[in-house]
Amino acid sequence: MKIVDDNSAEPRCPLCGRPLGTENIDRHHLVPKTFKGRAQFPIHKICHRKIHSVFTERELFKTYHSWEALQAHEEIRVFIDWVARKPPEFYTSTATTNAKKRR
């Protein structure tokens, strides 16, 4: 078994767990800026867009302000399972879900 030194390990996306790489990287506020969130985290652009296509700012503030809460949501879980097979630099546009459009 190979042991990986966490200090030398490649940074990973906190949502999907894939290596971040150097292309198509955004920053995500777990607590939205509109609710005074300051901490930012590097994340794949496609993962960031998916989060904002599913949730409103208020939902992110009230319920989905941790990586664990985001990952537990069914639509995000399905997305993570799909994107896990893509290379780190992969990006495609993300459509807003119908559930969010109705809110």
Image (cartoon, rainbow, N blue to C red):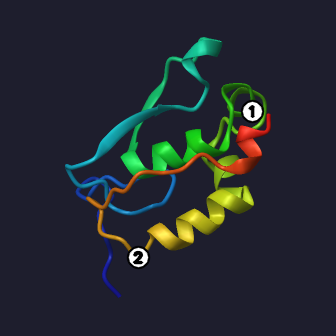
| Residue 57 horizontal/vertical position (percent) | 66, 27
Task: State the residue in front, 99 or 68.
Answer: 99
Q: Is residue 79 left or right of residue 25?
A: right
Give the number of the disc on residue 59: 1
Identify which amino acid the numbered label 2 is placed on.
Answer: Arg
Point 65% across, 14% down: residue: 35
| Secondary structure state at the residue bearing disc 1 | helix
Q: Residues within 10 Å of mark 1 (few under 14, many from 20)?
A: few
Residue drawn at the location 73% of the way across and 62% of the way down: 74
Task: From the viewer's side, name the closer residue of 11 and 2.
Answer: 11
Question: Where, quadrant-wise, is the C terminus in this rendering?
Answer: top right
Instruction: Kindly give the residue lying farthest to the left in the view shown.
Output: 22
Q: Position of residue 38 (x, y in %)?
A: 50, 17
Q: Mark 2 = which residue?
A: 85
Q: Residues within 10 Å of mark 2 (few under 14, many from 20)?
A: few
Residue 53 picture location, percent across and down = 59, 43
